[in-house]
């Protein structure tokens, strides 16, 4: 199942179920449904049967081209991202394989819809792309065992860990360089885990102005998603709607010679098999 948040140009957010080129408004078919995707995820067990029935209600269908897709979780509680998690990206960064998982946070204010513009900031023009599989926490919990990690995941999205390299590398802490406004686009919807199957067998690609820059598979993760969930949950309680950006493969602009950063007018697209794609035009910050 594919769950999205959209509006019809009137500023009123609706939760919908996507099927092909249409979306069924679950918010209209089920007026008592929470309008917050985090609440839907947290109460999935009690809501799932009604949602799956309503997802086929033709009376509430609308064409995707006639709506504006929003980020599928408007304000996640946590956005955690792992660095240096594909061997080719480690190599192009001239760094060794990390002994321990390398984590940083992206601030929730960086969230951006899947097709909205990415800002090239006045204070930070060295903007780069990073195609990533994003996992959405469902049941979550604390001290989750590795073999219990799959049950903690609700679904998956395409993500772009947009990074301002100047700010990222001027200090040992990466948070500011990873958290500029609009620099956490993801979506276009949440594909539920049951529909995806093994998240470690998905082709992942990025394109800038139609040129393929990254081309890999999530089977190449150094620390796979189950390792990530088990590790993170030792330190923090993972809650419904939290996001995990699982790492990017080689091919980022900063590693090119000379570096090729995004600039106003560029288009950047991320595709992941079974999950769809997100795409944005880059614009200069006003």
Image: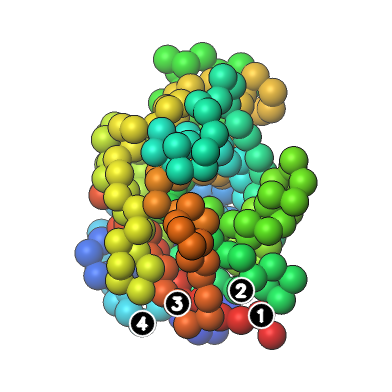
**Badge 2 density bin: few <14, some 14–19, many ≥20, Cα 10 Å:** many
Q: Can you identify the residue that label 3 sits on?
A: 266
For the residue labelled by badge 3, is the local secondary structure a helix, a strand or a loop?
A: loop
Q: What label does residue 285 carry, if any?
A: 1
Whether 117 is drawn above or below 111: the answer is: below
Q: Is residue 173 left or right of residue 74?
A: right
Residue topped by disc 4 = 66
Residue at x 63% of width, y 57% of height: 165
Between the residue at mark 1 and the residue at mark 4, the CA separation in whole angstroms equals 27 Å
Q: What's the image's color scheme? A: rainbow
Mark 4 and mark 2: Cα distance apart in space: 28 Å
- What's the mark number on residue 120? 2
Position in image of residue 123 (x %, y %)? 74, 71
Q: x and y percent of residue 114 in the render?
A: 46, 66
Marks 2 and 3: in contact by CB < 8 Å? Answer: no
x 47%, y 16%: residue? 146
Mark 1–mark 3 contact, CB under 8 Å? no
| Mark 3 vs mark 4, CA separation in Å | 24 Å
Q: Is residue 122 above or below residue 199?
A: below
Left or right relative to 95: residue 211: left
């Amino acid at each position: 199942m594919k769950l999205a948040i959209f509006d019809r140009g009137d500023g009123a957010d609706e939760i919908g179920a996507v099927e092909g080129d249409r979306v069924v408004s679950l918010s209209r078919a089920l007026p008592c449904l929470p309008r917050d995707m985090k609440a839907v995820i947290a109460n999935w067990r009690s809501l799932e049967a009604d949602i799956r029935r309503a997802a086929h209600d033709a009376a509430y269908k609308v064409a995707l081209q006639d709506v504006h897709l929003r980020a599928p979780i408007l304000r996640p509680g946590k956005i955690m991202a792992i660095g240096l998690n594909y061997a080719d990206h480690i190599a192009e960064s001239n760094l060794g394989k990390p002994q321990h998982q390398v984590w940083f946070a992206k601030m929730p204010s960086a969230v951006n819809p899947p097709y909205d513009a990415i800002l090239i900031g006045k204070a930070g023009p060295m903007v780069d792309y990073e195609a990533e599989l994003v996992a959405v926490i469902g049941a979550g919990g604390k001290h989750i065992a590795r073999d219990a990690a799959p049950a903690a995941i609700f679904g998956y999205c395409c993500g772009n860990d947009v990074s301002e390299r100047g700010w990222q590398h001027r200090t040992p802490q990466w948070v500011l360089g990873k958290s500029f406004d609009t620099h956490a686009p993801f979506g276009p919807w949440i594909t539920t885990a049951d529909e995806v199957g093994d998240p470690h067998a998905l082709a992942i690609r990025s394109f800038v102005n139609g040129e393929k820059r990254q081309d890999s598979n999530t089977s190449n993760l150094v620390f796979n998603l189950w390792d990530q969930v088990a590790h993170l949950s030792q330190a923090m309680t993972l809650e419904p709607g939290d996001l995990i950006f699982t790492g990017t493969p080689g091919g980022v602009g900063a590693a090119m010679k000379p570096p090729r950063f995004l600039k106003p007018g560029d288009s950047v697209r991320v595709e992941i098999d079974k999950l769809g794609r997100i795409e944005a035009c880059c614009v200069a910050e006003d």
